[in-house]
């Protein structure tokens, strides 16, 4: 049986925002006021909203402005995902671990909007939380930070086995448990959990729902695009393996490979132009 770790509870501010969101006519000003109570959350949210991957026509200058540009449901998905980051302020992770999570989340949202009929907000949450279990493991297992650094190029399927052997659980499971405990949706939890089995799922060797398989394909492609411009603390950085996984994901989504590479180059050019501006 996998070791049970302590999952950070949903912050009080998130519970209050969720309560407001359940209203028939959510009060954007009330949500904005709640977010401004947490300066770090507010600042990170605006940074994430203005990521080049989000494709905004103009920079969002406030929560109210972001709602006008993206809609309340999309904003709420971002708030939930970013609150995960704020739950691990005591974990010694480099800043690029979290900035990359924001990038992967934005790419997932973009790809889901382009290539699937599934919820881009769910895709954003999956991208943001796909490696959140690493923070949980570091927080509660002495030696895991060194372990994951030493194994950063180990394929996910083998890494999962090594983690269970060394620590009695794995970060994919812990990330999924957090998504489930925070009520982010079962598709989000399962997509995070099944990352070590992505190749088998995308090749039809393991059956899951079409939504989970699609989100896994999108996440696989998003991580590959992210790795093109930012070397980040993650797994599956072996180039041959990454290329094969990306090909499997494109085939599952029935995306023409030439079309994808053109879109990818446009996305990367757009990102680099905006970040260097």
Image (tube, helix red, strand yellow):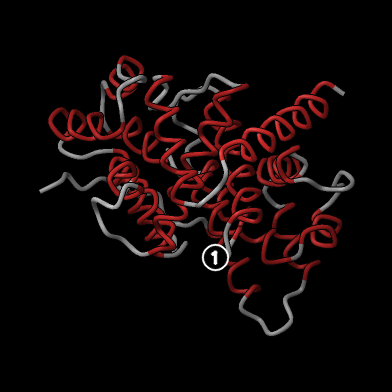
Name the residue: 15% across, 27% down: 166
- 269 and 42: which is toward the camera: 269
Residue farthest to the bottom, as pictured: 24
The answer to whether residue 13 of the structure is visible from this angle is no
Q: Residues within 10 Å of mark 1 (few under 14, many from 20)?
A: few
Q: Is residue 91 above or below residue 239?
A: below
Residue pictured at 72% horizontal, 64% vertical:
31
**Residue 133's spot in the image, x, y percent?**
37, 40
How far from the left and from the top, in percent, is residue 11? 51, 55
Q: Which secondary structure lies at badge 1?
A: helix
Which residue is drawn at the image coordinates 67% and 66% (left, top)? 73
**Residue placed at 51% from the left, 39% from the top?**
221
Residue situated in front as seen by the camera: 10 or 182: 182
- Any part of residue 109 in sight: yes
Q: Would you identify the image quadrant in which residue 249 lies?
A: top left
Residue 266 rendering spot, x and y as whole percentages: 74, 33
Q: Which residue carries the number 1 mark? A: 15
- In the rendered view of the protein, which quadrant contains the C terminus? top right
Q: Is residue 94 left or right of residue 147?
A: right
């Amino acid at each position: 049986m996998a070791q049970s770790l302590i999952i950070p509870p949903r912050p009080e501010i998130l519970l209050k925002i969720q309560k407001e969101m359940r209203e028939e006519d959510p009060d954007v000003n009330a949500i904005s006021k709640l977010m401004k109570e947490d300066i770090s959350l507010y600042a990170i949210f605006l940074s994430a909203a203005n990521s080049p991957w989000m494709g905004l026509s103009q920079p969002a200058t406030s929560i109210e402005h972001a709602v006008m540009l993206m809609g309340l449901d999309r904003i709420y998905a971002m708030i939930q995902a970013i609150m995960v980051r704020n739950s691990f302020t005591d974990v010694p992770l480099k800043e690029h671990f979290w900035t990359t999570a924001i990038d992967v989340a934005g790419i997932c949202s973009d790809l889901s909007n382009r290539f699937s009929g599934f919820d881009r907000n769910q895709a954003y949450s999956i991208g943001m939380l796909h490696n959140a279990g690493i923070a949980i493991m570091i927080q509660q297992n002495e030696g895991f930070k060194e372990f994951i650094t030493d194994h950063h190029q180990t394929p996910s399927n083998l890494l999962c086995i090594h983690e269970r052997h060394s620590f009695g659980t794995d970060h994919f499971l812990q990330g999924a448990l957090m998504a489930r405990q925070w009520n982010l949706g079962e598709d989000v939890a399962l997509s995070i959990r099944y990352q070590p089995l992505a190749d088998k799922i995308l090749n039809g060797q393991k059956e899951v729902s079409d939504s989970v398989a699609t989100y896994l394909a999108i996440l696989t492609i998003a991580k590959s695009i992210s790795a093109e411009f930012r070397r980040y603390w993650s797994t599956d950085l072996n180039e041959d393996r990454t290329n094969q996984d990306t090909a499997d994901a494109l085939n599952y989504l029935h995306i023409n490979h030439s079309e994808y590479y053109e879109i990818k180059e446009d996305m990367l050019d757009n990102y680099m132009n905006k970040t260097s501006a």
